[in-house]
Amino acid sequence: MAENKHNWVQDVLNGNIFTMEAARRQYKLLVLIFVLMIVYIFEGYRSQQQQARIVELNRALQDAHYEYLTVNAELTEMSRQSVVSQRLKDAGSNVKESLTPPVSIK
């Protein structure tokens, strides 16, 4: 038994397994297995690249969100009534604030 096992291992290492009749009958299966291994490896690398791209895009999205929040806060501050009236006063404009409250039309 041990000698038979040794011969099989030796045949695999020498490449003699490909000259054996059983291997020649199964060459289509061996080619299919080889092709599937190549596809599996390729898809693994491609998925790693896609994951890296997703991380990069998430960082860019987070940066854009923070920039939006900053710009929105600045716009809110600039459009406050007290800031607008002060800027008009500093610019020397004759526009005055209305002292009557707005009226809702129904």
Image (cartoon, rainbow, N blue to C red):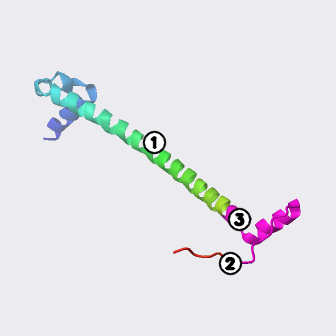
Which amino acid type is marked by label 3? Ser
Which disc, if any, is residue 67? Answer: none
- Residue 11 quadrant: top left
Of pointers 3 and 2, the one earlier in the residue sequence = 3
Distance from Cα at disc 2 to Cα at disc 1: 60 Å
SS at circle 3: loop
Per the image, is 32 magenta? Answer: no
SS at circle 2: loop
Residue 74 screen position, x and y as percent: 70, 62
- Residue situated in front as seen by the camera: 29 or 69: 69
The nearer-to-camera label among 2 and 1 is 2
Is there CB contact under 8 Å for labels 2 and 1? no
**From what the image shows, is residue 54 above or below residue 83?**
above
For label 3, the residue is 79
**Quadrant assignment for the N terminus:** top left
Of pointers 2 and 1, the one earlier in the residue sequence = 1
Residue 36 screen position, x and y as percent: 26, 35
